[in-house]
Image (cartoon, rainbow, N blue to C red):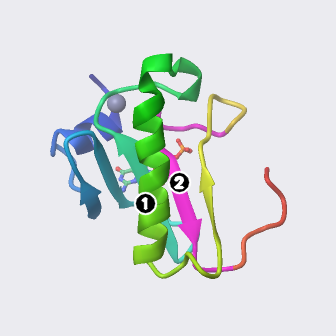
Amino acid sequence: MDCIFCKIVAGEIPSDTVYQDEEIIAFRDINPQAPVHIVIIPRKHIPSLDQLKESDSALVGRLVTLANRLAKEEGIADKGYRVVINCGKEGGQLVPHLHLHLVGGRRLSDQVG
Ligand code: 5GP
Ligand code: ZN
């Protein structure tokens, strides 16, 4: 499959991995928007939030819980941070494999989008 994040999952493209288990991988964004910018993905190819199934709920819970844990590990939990899921063209999603952005380490915009 021609999906860049599936290639990262398969180890075909290197990444600066900060966490991995049997379901999830988290790595530093190649083009960071803030001092901390981590991408959290399921190993399983889910194209977008729009494609989510009821049966994926536990997995999504784990993705969000990992964002909480990594924010603590990265030292940004106390000051605050943002977790973003872009969905679809107008939502700014460029890579069609569900992912969360964990962004922090500077004062972020008050605007959501
Ligand atoms: P999106 O706009 O789809 O929500 O975000 C995709 C993110 O993936 C972008 O922030 C982009 O910098 C990041 N990205 C794209 N390709 C790669 C890659 O090969 N390696 C890493 N580490 N990040 C990538
Ligand atoms: Zn994929």
* Residue at x 79%, y 50% (from the top left corner): 113
Decide which of 1, 20 is in the foreground and name it. 20
The answer to whether any part of residue 47 appears in the image is yes
Local packing at callout 1 (Cα closer than 10 Å; few below 14, some 14-19, many 20+) is: some
Which mark is in front, 1 or 2?
2
Residue type at the position of mark 2 = His
Instruction: Using residue 69 as the reference point, say whether residue 6 is left or right of it.
Output: left
Q: Quadrant of residue 106?
A: bottom right
Residue type at the position of mark 1 = Asp
Mark 1 and mark 2 residues within 8 Å of each other at the beta carbon: yes
Q: Return the mark for residue 2.
A: none
User: What stretch of residues is rendered in magenta?
Assistant: 92-106
Instruction: Using residue 104 as the reference point, say whether residue 26 is left or right of it.
Output: left
* Residue at x 46%, y 53% (from the top left corner): 65
Q: Return the mark for residue 101.
A: 2
Q: Quadrant of the N terminus?
A: top left
Whether the residue carrying mark 1 lies under 8 Å from ligand 1 is answered with yes
Local packing at callout 2 (Cα closer than 10 Å; few below 14, some 14-19, many 20+) is: many
Decide which of 89, 60 is in the foreground and name it. 60
Furthest residue in direction left, as rendered: 11
Whether the residue carrying mark 2 lies under 8 Å from ligand 1 is answered with yes
The location of residue 44, given as percent across then percent down, is 30, 29
Magenta segment's dominant SS is loop
Quarter of the render that holds ligand 2: top left
Residue 100 vertical placement versus 54 (above, below): below
Report the number of numbered marks: 2
The residue that mark 1 highlights is 29
SS class, disc 1: loop
The location of residue 110, given as percent across then percent down, is 84, 65
* Residue at x 65%, y 40% (from the top left corner): 92
Residue 44 vertical placement versus 22 (above, below): above
